[in-house]
Image (cartoon, rainbow, N blue to C red):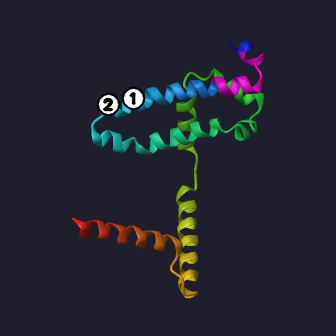
Amino acid sequence: MVTDSINMTKDVLAEKLYQTMQTEYDNYLARVLQMEPEGIVQEAYGIITRADILILFEDDVWTNTLSKEQLVVACQLKNPLESLYLEWLDRDTNHMETLGESVRYSLESYARSLLAGHLPTSCKKTEKARNHHVKQEMQR
């Protein structure tokens, strides 16, 4: 089986890997959806992160950054999506740091808009949605 993979092009390997992981994800999601609501909530991070990994492999530009050897090895994994997900969980990531920086940047942007006498764009969207909701309620 390794010999078969070695003879494939990177594009074929990437597609084979993607299809394998898509099937794996579909099976995982079907199992999760059979759970009680609390179990589904507990699996939410796993659902999203596995989907994000899968999305990476939909991107030809990103997939082309992988070596043929990496693709061959990934194709040999019994459950490549699960393996990559578990590796992700073991990494020391800075997800909260990145999220915090994004929130800080947004709040700084909002403050600059307010100081300039403008309502920040997302506040305008929220205000517009609120006004729309109020109008709908008044029509009832």
Q: How many residues crowd around disc 1 within 10 Å: few (fewer than 14), some, or many (20 or more)?
A: few
- Please identify the quadrant where the N terminus is shown: top right
What main secondary structure does the magenta stretch of the protein show? helix
Q: Residue furthest left?
A: 140
| Residue 88 included in the magenta stretch of the image | no
Q: Pointers 2 and 1 in contact (CB under 8 A)?
A: yes
Q: Seen in the image, is 105 located left or right of residue 33? A: right
Residue at 54%, 25% (x, y): give it.
Answer: 79
The residue segment tinted magenta is: 5-16
Residue occupied by mark 2: 34
Instruction: Estimate the spatial distance between the alpha carbons at disc 2 and disc 1, rounded to whole Å.
Output: 7 Å
Q: Seen in the image, is 61 located left or right of residue 120? A: right
Residue at 52%, 76% (x, y): give it.
Answer: 120
- Please identify the quadrant where the C terminus is shown: bottom left
What amino acid does circle 1 point to? Ala
Q: Seen in the image, is 113 located left or right of residue 6? A: left
What amino acid does circle 2 point to? Gln
Residue 64, by quadrant, is: top right
Residue at 52%, 38% (x, y): give it.
Answer: 50
**Nearer to the camera, 103 or 94:** 103
Residue 5, by quadrant, is: top right
**Residue 25 x/y as whole percent:** 49, 30
Residue occupied by mark 1: 30
**Residue 11 x/y as whole percent:** 74, 27
**Nearer to the camera, 52 or 75:** 52
Q: How many residues crowd around disc 2 within 10 Å: few (fewer than 14), some, or many (20 or more)?
A: few
**Residue 53 x/y as whole percent:** 58, 39
| Residue 11 included in the magenta stretch of the image | yes
Indicate the secondary structure of the residue bearing disc 2.
loop
Indicate the secondary structure of the residue bearing disc 1.
helix
**Residue 137 x/y as whole percent:** 25, 67
**On screen, residue 17 above or below 129:** above
